[in-house]
Image: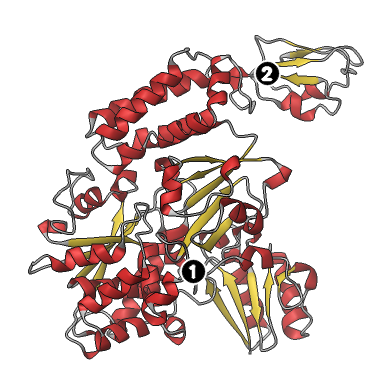
Amino acid sequence: MKKIKVGMGTCGVSAGGEQIFNEMKRVITANHLDIELSETGCMGMCYEEPLIEVQDDADNFLYAKMSVDKVGRLIDEHIVHDHPVNKWIVRSKEHSEEDSFLKKQVRIVLRNCGEINPNSIDEYIALGGYDAVQQVLNNHSRLDVIDIISKSGLRGRGGGGFPTGLKWRITHDVESDKKYIICNADEGDPGAFMDRSVLEGDPHSVLEGMMIGAYAIGADVGIIYARAEYPLAIKRLKNALSQCRSKGFLGRNIFGSKFSFDINIKEGAGAFVCGEETALIASVEGRRGIPRIRPPFPSQQGLWGKPTNINNVETFANVPWIILNGWEAYASLGTEKSKGTKVFALAGKIRRSGLVEVPMGITINEIIYDIGGGIKNNGKFKAVQMGGPSGGCIPASMGDLKIDYDEITKTGAIMGSGGLIVLDDSTCMVDLAKYFLNFTQLESCGKCTFCRIGTKRMLEVLERMTDGRGRSSDIMFLEDLGSKIKRASLCGLGQTAPNPVLTTIKYFREEYEAHLNQKCPAHLCSSLITYSISEENCKGCLLCKKACSSGAISGSKKTLHVIDQALCNKCGKCYEVCNLDAVIRL
């Protein structure tokens, strides 16, 4: 029997995957075909969505950029007559267009994403699912489990990189009648979609990881704090929890042991600050999500005042694999201080946007060129924004930098949860810094004066600079205030909010200086752009005049055209349509 899998992560659904799935179901039913039709999560190649994989005994055929009108031909030629439609295939034994995208990846967290139906617990079990938690309950003490995770070198993948085993040990060692374990699925970085894709594609791996962590620290209640903007992830999580309970994998005396544990979901309202542990706990308790002073740390005094361990989605998804394959296998990957793999959401000016999982120690250039296929539209690689609003920009000149927690931190950026936005020479670094600072300023809870007011003052300076009203002292002011906000803020949001500004000043200072001189090198800040028409090249073709929405261009056919600067709205349409290089952009 042939099997057809349709990519139905959020990326696939938004590209039309659901309509394709329904059409395939209709055609298969109408023709009484003996075909297993299944949905699956994100396959990683978001740039090729919608994706369909046809599996048979001979080969797996991956079809890209599918549409409803292609379904009939695909089923007729490939399924009925056994003739694959070669021009739509991007990967099979004979077609290897995507080999370079996959060749340098090592899929541990993403091992089941795009492989199994996320709605089927049986498919997860068939691939060894829940074997790890049974092995733990039957053969290991709590401290044994903590020792395995510690030796593996797994560090928290939520951004801070704190050693997971040490975190578990601290929580384990605290005496209490009640303990909690929380999965932080409040992924809020612009451009980040790693945790969402894992929850949509392989929710059971996260649940199993939480079960193992709960056993290790002595917790009997787990909570997944997931943002409400992830409806598909929440839907699949709820289904997975229901399936676990029906099989007895959650509840009392799991797998015949003395271990009892259950998991609930708390939907967050989208506050970025609730990604911080103490703010998250406040939100779960029904209070406003505001960070508190630490210590005491959540491991000592967390949810409802009880010891609480918090890890993110990616961290928990690693745990079952480590238990089944041994800590040595995981520790063999990566660098001395950063073991294992890291999942990144590739976005921005990259040819192959999507989800990738790479071994620690790989370089930025390898990710961008070998995996991502280089810069879109043959642009020039300028920088990567890593770590989201809390991260920073790393210039192209540092492309050989290894992906390692400590090495990334030395640049002034942070690893973060895994958002990696690729920038080309059309990106204005001052405008980019303004975008991220505007985000963190809006998301500040307002508790700290430096974070609440300091980020506002920095944003005002950036707005002035991009509007052509910069002052000679602005750069020094941004550096000084940024360093003070980092030192004086209470939580990670304020402590890292200046990073995008400080790193862009550090590596692209000349762009800030150009803005003070009323120039935007990327020609992006409209207030700093002037359009004029060259007398030498203008042939009076009327193209620019017809494209001008503000009526700023005057001139008749075959005569020199002129732009009225008072009427010009800087839209750039005249520059785009002119094929004689007559429109000059300064």
Does residue 547 appear to the left or right of 464 in the view shown? right
What kind of colouring is applied to the model shown?
secondary structure
Q: Position of residue 506 (x, y in %)?
A: 48, 31
Of 569 and 361, which appears nearest the observer?
361
* 424 left or right, relative to 547: left
- Vertical comparison of 27 with 514: above or below: below
Residue at 68 percent of width and 40 percent of height: 380
Dot 2 corresponds to which residue?
A: 550
| Vertical position of residue 179 compared to residue 185: above or below | below
At 90% from the left and 18% from the top, the residue drawn is 539
User: What number is the disc on residue 110?
Assistant: 1
Instruction: Residue 440: give x, y in percent of width and height.
Output: 37, 36
Picture quadrant of residue 238? bottom left
The amino acid type, in three-letter code, at marker 1 is Leu
Observer-side mark, 2 or 1, equals: 1
The circle drawn on residue 298 is: none
Give the Cα distance between marks 2 and 1.
Answer: 50 Å
Which of pointers 2 and 1 lies earlier in the amino acid sequence? 1
Type of amino acid under label 2? Ser
Q: Residue furthest front?
A: 336
